[in-house]
Amino acid sequence: MSITPQELELLMQEVEKEDPIDFADLPFEEHDLRGLISNHLCEMADAMESFSDEDKHLTLLAVAAKLVLENMVLNIQLLRRHGVPLSETTEALLQRLRKPGED
């Protein structure tokens, strides 16, 4: 791998400056969580060494898409659990996806 887990952690922190993560009251240290994830991702990248560039790219896109979807679902669930309305834009987007007769 061309990046170490420690370097990836630093990049994660740089990205978080623009879009901070709310760790709330999780019983874990932020640094430990970043370390766990950066190690896991570097291991995944190492496992893809034999992949073609295209397969690496497609795999990383699939992983990113899954994580973004999971994050969206968890955020919507959290907002609903706390009775916080969705933004008009988000609500309009989700309304387009609802099956006819569901509300």
Image (tube, rainbow, N blue to C red):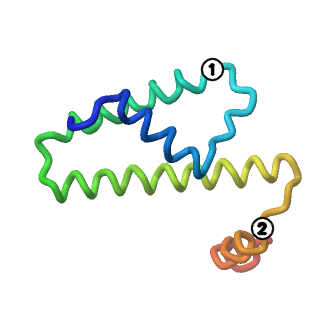
User: Alpha-carbon neighbours of circle 1 within 10 Å: few (<14), some, or many (≥20)?
Assistant: few
x%, y% of residue 64? 42, 52
x%, y% of residue 59? 29, 52
Left or right? Give the position of 102 relative to 68. Answer: right
Q: What residue is shown with label 1? A: 28
Kind of element beneath mark 2: loop
x%, y% of residue 86? 79, 63
Report which quarter residue 35 is drawn in. top left
45 or 69: nearer the viewer: 45
Q: Earlier in the sequence, mark 1 or mark 2?
A: 1
Report which quarter residue 24 is drawn in. top right
Q: How many marks?
A: 2
Q: Which mark is residue 74?
A: none
User: Alpha-carbon neighbours of circle 2 within 10 Å: few (<14), some, or many (≥20)?
Assistant: few
Q: What residue is shown with label 2? A: 87
Query: The disc labelled 2 sits on which kind of residue?
Result: Ser
